[in-house]
């Protein structure tokens, strides 16, 4: 009798596990593992650190990656766009032009706004080029965005004249590095309402609503699910895909600005590999490369997982190249486990 | 002619190398079901694509309600009250039933967001109209074929279609579901919808249609009132030759030797304790409604799906483990979904033919293209695959010829046992006869054949023995020579135990 009950309990316990998304389980594993490996990991300051790191990089890029993947594309140009947009913002802030100099002296806030707008326009241009080529030709997104990845990165080098640009404007630095509310723990001031987070969260909320409750979102899912059916249902597939890549350019530009601000410099190589972290986050969050799956919120969970993993690996002093290997293997493992689990069902 | 709501006049449409439509005229009256028949490549689908704006005609007029109109895309067609249900279902599997029904035309609230409540309510109303209890919130991927088709019909209705084009609507349905579809068509008709109905199934034309128009080689051959039309005449119009209705297979060539033995096989709720045998040289028909477990049984035998229990033996050796093992045991499998499981459409005919036997043909691992070409040409001649050249891509071939390519693939592996799942679905009458003769010929050469079919005449005219499946069970074994259609249906629907 007792044995039977035990057996019952066991199965129900296993059932609960098997129903949990793999990301949540791995999330817990990562938190526990790094807490054991280093006492620097599970601290308020480090947790906020992870949040800021994710908010000013992979978090926003992951959202863009998700949009591309969901509509059966992949956007490899995101890292390049991040770099180019960040560099444009830095350049405007320090550019020695009479007009800009005048604004810099009279109205520094206006200059920051100009810098941000210029960066966003840069992102929109790259996104528009991606989107235009993609909707007008039959070339796969992989190829076009691979090309634009290089274009973006090189553009950043050209704009920065081959070096990085140091940004000294405190107000600009506040965007990526500042916080609305600080607490003091162990005599250290920790920002618990970072601006970057306050940019990231509304973005995700907006896109969550966009995907679930608007025609545009439904069309993205429809294109990913069955492109032919979408066409025959009178959906303007070309327009939708164009918009996806335009939005992606915009999102990557936001990431570029926030990142340049947090690092207090525009560096052409900052975006390098960011598109892969973004894709990893989206895939870990449940996006399938055949399209039509997952949501922004799932992607956010994936982004924080990648972010926590990177942060933890940094804290235990792992080399960047080994980190890439680890993240790659984790991503492969998650996707494989997920596939096996859904097969079982 | 005031009750004519649509007429297509002198439509011509050419593609590079072929004139798909040559001066075709067609008209549709209010509340009528006008059946359009013709062999594959006769131009039926092209004509419908012209009507729904997918193609633009080179010449000719579309006259709707007495006015000449120009339709440049499907959306415009919808706005004019013309909807089409394509042969291949065009639903988005990852969206819900309701989302699919209103895809592209979602109702919106004052904030510009999709009005979910209205979406569900309207979907429910339309589903109720067809007396369907499908949950509008269910994902389409979770529905069976028949339910998916119903969603297609509902989707078409939701645009307030006055004209509904149905392309081979019964191809994927079983007898029982076809009856449901026909009653739906009747009620659509009563509600003022006119229907253009494309079909290959001769026996259903008179039941569902008011008028029948035959197309052949891009030309209108003639139109007949359904009541007066003779099937023999229609077939003559389609193919220009008589096709016999009598038994295709006259002599049972089965031997004592068992080539396939399935013992007590179960697979979840889908297959329950299945026992069956196929002998060498025998054609065994497997009848049943869609969803009765026939295709799943074929997949378990071939080793694509794993059985939970039981045993599968091919020529006395263990099988049903994996396709690799099944091929080693000299088994072949022609899936019901040719495009998806049978062919690499963008590869040449010759590659498709040798695909499953590369190891035997080229043990060194290097493909001898000359030899491959010769082998493929031999099969082309033997099976009369209509292609001038085996280097042509499979996608350019008609359905019947694609099926022959798949058959050639399994002949190339020297299969001794072959499963045909819906061997002639979507294939025109002439090619159908050829494929039937080939199956018959294979059996007389000692190949054991398990033939799954929803086309009852096919089961009746071809099988030596017939198994009938229902709800995952084999409910009856019948003698193919003495049984009747009525008997098979009775067991399939549960009218007889």
Image (cartoon, rainbow, N blue to C red):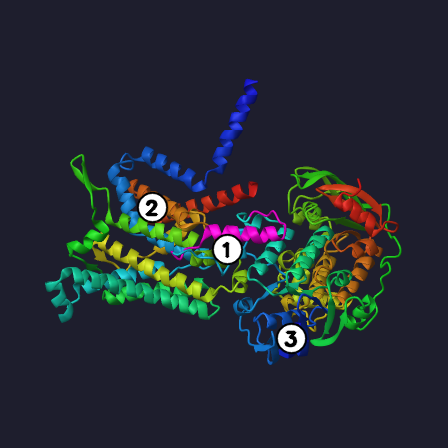
Q: Quadrant of the N terminus of chain A?
A: top right
Between the residue at mark 1 and the residue at mark 2, the CA separation in whole angstroms equals 25 Å
Q: Dot 1 corresponds to which residue?
A: A290
- Asked if residue A179 shows in the view, the reply is yes
Label 1 neighbour load within 10 Å: few <14, some 14-19, many 20+:
some
Residue plotted at (15% across, 56% down): A168
Q: Quadrant of residue A258?
A: bottom left
Between the residue at mark 2 and the residue at mark 3, the CA separation in whole angstroms equals 63 Å
In-image side of A317 versus B45 (left or right): left
Secondary element at tag 2: helix
Asked if A33 appears above or below B39 in the picture, the reply is: above
Mark 2 falls within which chain?
A: A
Mark 1 falls within which chain?
A: A
Mark 3 falls within which chain?
A: B
Q: Percent from the top left, x then y, of residue B205? A: 75, 63
Label 3 neighbour load within 10 Å: few <14, some 14-19, many 20+:
many
Q: Dot 2 corresponds to which residue?
A: A307
Res B7 label: 3
Q: Percent from the top left, x then y, of residue B422? A: 72, 55
Q: Viewer-nearest of labels 2 and 3?
A: 3
């Amino acid at each position: 009798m007792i044995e039977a009950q035990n057996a019952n309990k066991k199965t129900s316990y296993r059932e609960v596990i098997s129903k949990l998304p793999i990301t949540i389980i791995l999330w817990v594993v990562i938190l526990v593992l790094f807490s054991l490996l280093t006492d620097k990991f599970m601290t308020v300051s480090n947790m906020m650190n992870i949040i800021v790191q994710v908010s000013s990089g992979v978090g926003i890029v992951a959202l863009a990656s998700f949009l591309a993947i969901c509509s059966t594309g992949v956007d490899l140009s995101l890292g390049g766009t991040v770099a180019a947009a960040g560099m444009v913002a830095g350049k405007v802030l320090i550019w020695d032009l009479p007009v800009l100099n005048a604004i810099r002296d009279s109205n520094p806030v206006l200059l920051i706004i100009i810098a941000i707008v210029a960066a966003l326009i840069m992102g929109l241009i790259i996104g528009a080029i991606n989107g235009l080529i993609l909707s007008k030709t039959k070339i796969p997104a992989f190829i076009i965005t691979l090309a634009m990845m290089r274009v973006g990165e090189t553009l950043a080098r050209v704009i920065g004249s081959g070096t990085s640009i140091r940004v000294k404007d405190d107000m600009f630095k506040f965007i990526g590095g500042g916080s609305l509310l600080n607490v003091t723990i162990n005599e250290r001031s920790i920002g618990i309402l970072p601006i970057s987070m306050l940019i990231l969260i509304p973005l995700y909320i907006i896109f969550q609503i966009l995907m679930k409750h608007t025609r545009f979102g439904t069309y993205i899912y429809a294109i990913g699910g069955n492109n032919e059916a979408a066409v025959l249902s009178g959906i303007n597939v070309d327009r939708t895909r164009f918009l996806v890549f335009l939005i992606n350019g915009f999102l990557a530009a936001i990431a570029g600005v926030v990142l340049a601000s947090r690092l207090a410099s525009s560096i052409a190589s900052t975006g390098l590999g960011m598109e892969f972290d973004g894709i990893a986050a989206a895939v870990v969050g449940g996006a399938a490369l055949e399209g039509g799956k997952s949501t922004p919120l799932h992607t956010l969970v994936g982004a924080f997982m990648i972010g926590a993993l990177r942060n933890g690996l940094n804290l235990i002093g792992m080399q960047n190249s080994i980190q890439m290997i680890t993240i790659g293997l984790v991503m492969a493992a998650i996707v494989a486990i997920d596939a096996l689990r859904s097969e079982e069902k | 002619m005031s009750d004519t709501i649509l007429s297509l006049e002198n439509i011509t449409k050419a593609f590079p190398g072929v004139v798909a439509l040559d001066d075709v005229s067609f008209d549709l009256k209010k509340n009528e079901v006008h059946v359009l028949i013709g062999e594959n490549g006769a131009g039926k689908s092209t004509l419908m694509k012209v009507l729904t704006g997918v193609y633009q005609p080179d010449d000719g007029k579309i006259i709707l309600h007495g006015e000449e109109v120009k339709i440049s895309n499907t959306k415009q067609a919808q706005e004019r009250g013309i909807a089409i249900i394509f042969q291949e279902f065009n639903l988005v599997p990852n969206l819900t039933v309701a989302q699919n029904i209103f895809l592209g035309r979602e109702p919106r609230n004052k904030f510009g967001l999709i009005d979910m409540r209205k979406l569900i309510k309207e979907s429910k109303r339309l589903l109720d109209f067809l007396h369907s209890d499908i949950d509008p919130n269910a994902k389409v991927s979770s529905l069976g074929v028949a339910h998916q088709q119903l969603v297609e019909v509902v989707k078409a209705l939701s645009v307030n279609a006055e004209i509904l084009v149905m392309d081979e609507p019964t191809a994927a349905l079983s007898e029982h579901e076809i009856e449901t579809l026909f009653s739906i068509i009747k009620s659509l008709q009563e509600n003022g919808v006119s229907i253009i109905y494309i079909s290959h199934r001769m026996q259903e034309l008179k039941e569902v249609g008011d008028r029948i128009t035959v197309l052949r080689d891009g030309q209108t051959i003639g139109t007949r009132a359904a009541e007066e039309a003779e099937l023999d005449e229609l077939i003559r119009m389609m193919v220009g030759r008589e096709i016999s209705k009598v038994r295709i297979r006259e002599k049972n060539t089965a031997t004592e030797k068992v080539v396939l033995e399935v013992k007590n096989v179960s697979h979840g709720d889908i297959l329950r304790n299945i026992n069956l045998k196929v002998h060498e040289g025998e054609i065994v028909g497997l009848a049943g409604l869609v969803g009765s477990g026939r295709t799943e049984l074929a997949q378990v035998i071939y080793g694509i799906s794993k059985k939970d229990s039981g045993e599968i033996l091919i020529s006395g050796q263990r099988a049903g483990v994996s396709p690799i093992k099944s091929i080693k045991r000299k088994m072949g499998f022609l899936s019901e979904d040719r495009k998806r499981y049978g062919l690499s459409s963008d590869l040449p005919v010759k590659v498709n033919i040798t695909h499953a036997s590369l190891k035997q043909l080229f043990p060194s691992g290097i493909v001898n293209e000359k030899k491959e070409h010769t082998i493929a040409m031999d099969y082309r001649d033997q099976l009369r695959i209509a292609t001038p050249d085996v280097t042509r891509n499979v996608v350019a071939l008609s359905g019947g010829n694609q099926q022959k390519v798949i058959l050639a693939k399994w002949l190339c592996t020297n299969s001794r046992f072959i499963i045909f799942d819906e061997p002639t679905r979507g294939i025109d009458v002439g090619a159908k006869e050829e494929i039937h003769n080939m199956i018959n010929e294979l059996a007389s050469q000692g190949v054991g054949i398990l033939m799954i079919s929803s086309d009852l005449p096919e089961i009746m005219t071809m099988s030596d023995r017939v198994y009938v499946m229902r709800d995952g069970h084999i409910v009856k074994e019948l003698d193919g020579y003495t049984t009747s259609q009525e008997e098979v249906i009775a067991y399939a629907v549960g009218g007889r135990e």
